[in-house]
Image (cartoon, helix red, strand yellow):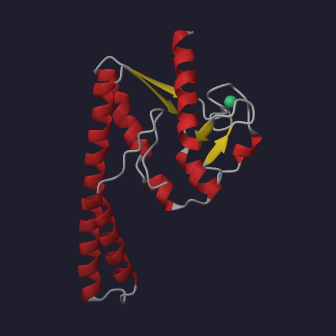
Amino acid sequence: MHELYKDSNGNVPEYPRYYRKSEKKLQKEQRKLSLMQKDSKNCEKQRIKVAGRHEKVANQRKDFLHKQSRQITNTYDCVCIENLDMQAMSQTLHFGKSVSDNGWGMFTEFLRYKLEEARKMLVKVDRFFASSQTCSCCGYKNPATKDLSVREWICPECGIRHDRDVNAAINIRNEGMRLVLA
Ligand SMILES: [Zn+2]
């Protein structure tokens, strides 16, 4: 879950390198803080330092999410996304901090209001829709893809090779467009 998303054209926007760098620095300072004697003067200093790094990381992430949602809004008239419950997901799959922290909630909120302002559409596709299991080419349902470790698969029905996430994204786009046209 290092990426923010993968889209139906196979685009994978990555957090910029400077953001990853700040994140690593924050982790380092946090580790330092956890080893310090509580209530000491140095500990207080370190706490302030960590708070500052936290803010920097949060601002850089926000900035990146604004740029991404702006670019999408300028490029497309209608955007279909999977309606994910990130909190439930990180708990069930034990991904821990990385999922809830990768900014998905904030990103979809930015996307929602930017599209709305531009009089464009954001369509949320139900998360129970079998986007990962269905072949976007022929509609065959492949139960083997329930296993999350399957990142690529070949459809036994039509023989096409799928990237798990791109195939799911195409299905979400198609389902979203079906809902819009209905
Ligand atoms: Zn197929």
> Does 48 sit left or right of 2 as displayed?
left
> Does 126 sit left or right of 173 as displayed?
right
Query: Which corner quadrant of the image does residue 75 belong to?
Result: top left
Residue at horizontal 74 percent and vertical 31 percent from the top: 157
Query: Which corner quadrant of the image does residue 69 belong to?
Result: top left
Quadrant for the C terminus in the image: top right
Residue at horizontal 40 percent and vertical 49 percent from the top: 103
Residue that protrudes farthest toward the top in the picture:
182
Residue 27: image x %, image y %?
36, 72
Q: Nearer the viewer, residue 87 or 74?
A: 74
Is 67 rendered above or below residue 150? above
> Does 102 sit left or right of 162 as displayed?
left
> Number of labelled discs?
0
| Ligand 1 - quadrant of the structure image | top right
Residue 42: image x %, image y %?
25, 87
Residue that protrudes farthest toward the front in the picture:
159
Please say whether residue 83 is visible from this viewpoint: no
Residue at horizontal 55 percent and vertical 50 percent from the top: 87
Residue at horizontal 59 percent and vertical 43 percent from the top: 164
Residue 33: image x %, image y %?
35, 81
Please say whether residue 69 is visible from this viewpoint: yes
Is 31 rendered above or below residue 57? below
Is 83 rendered above or below residue 177? below
Is 96 rendered above or below residue 107? below
Residue 47: image x %, image y %?
29, 76
